[in-house]
Image (cartoon, rainbow, N blue to C red):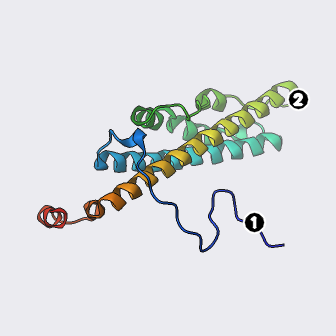
């Protein structure tokens, strides 16, 4: 028996689905849609980074490291505030599918305590929850990225000359290309 394709992928040789315009993006200009998609990509990179940091911290806590081994990581997460990108993203398309982010600053201020199994178990559980919430947020970003990409493809299909606007052409060459 052969390997099954991953969920969400199409079998080799299968036709690509026809791109369809999506109403939730109707209010955006092409430039705004591209900007939104770029912002989603940047936010996904930041969230992936935070998630890796939380996973590393969780690994250290599980290994029984004390706070001294974690202190140098604290400033990394505190400086990379979770609020800025998220606010910009949910202003463009409603927040329905975007889960809340954990309070990473508060979590980062907590350290394992030698000999306090209850405290350390709570810290581990809270880090696990933060990693789970970051993963859910990241999955929502991936869905939005996919939707925005599909919208761009549909617009380009409807008006192929729009794709030329993405090229770094001089303004007069761009006007001729879209005329």
Q: Horizontally, is 122 left or right of 103 in the view?
A: right
Q: Which of 148 and 38 is in front in this view?
A: 148
The quarter of the picture where the N terminus appears is bottom right
The quarter of the picture where the C terminus appears is bottom left
Residue 4 percent across, percent down from the top left: 75, 66
Query: Badge 2, how many Cα within 10 Å: few under 14, some, many 20+?
Result: few
Q: Earlier in the sequence, mark 2 or mark 1?
A: 1
In the drawing, what numbered circle is on residue 4? 1
Q: Nearer the viewer, mark 2 or mark 1?
A: 1
Q: Horizontally, is 4 left or right of 88 in the view?
A: right
Q: Residue at x 52, y 47 (%)?
A: 44
The residue under label 2 is 115
Q: Which residue is drawn at 46% across and 32% down?
A: 94
Please identify the quarter of the rendering in which residue 84 is found: top left
Q: In this view, does 177 lie above or below 47?
A: below
Q: Which residue is drawn at 62% across and 64% down?
A: 10
Q: Horizontally, is 107 left or right of 96 in the view?
A: right
């Amino acid at each position: 028996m052969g390997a099954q394709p991953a969920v969400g992928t199409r079998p080799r040789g299968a036709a690509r689905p026809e791109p369809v315009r999506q109403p939730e993006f109707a209010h955006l200009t092409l430039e705004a849609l591209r900007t939104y998609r770029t912002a989603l990509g940047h936010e996904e990179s930041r969230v992936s980074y935070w998630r890796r940091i939380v996973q590393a911290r969780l690994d250290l806590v599980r290994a029984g490291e004390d706070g001294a081994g974690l202190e140098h990581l604290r400033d990394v997460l505190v400086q990379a505030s979770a609020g800025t990108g998220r606010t910009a993203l949910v202003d463009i398309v409603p927040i329905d599918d975007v889960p809340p982010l954990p309070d990473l600053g508060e979590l980062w201020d907590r350290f394992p305590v030698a000999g306090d199994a209850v405290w350390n178990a709570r810290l581990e559980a809270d880090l696990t929850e933060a990693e789970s919430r970051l993963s859910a947020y990241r999955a929502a970003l991936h869905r939005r990225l996919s939707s925005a990409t599909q919208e761009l493809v549909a617009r380009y299909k409807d008006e192929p000359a729009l794709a030329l606007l993405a090229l770094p052409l001089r303004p007069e060459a761009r006007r001729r290309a879209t005329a």
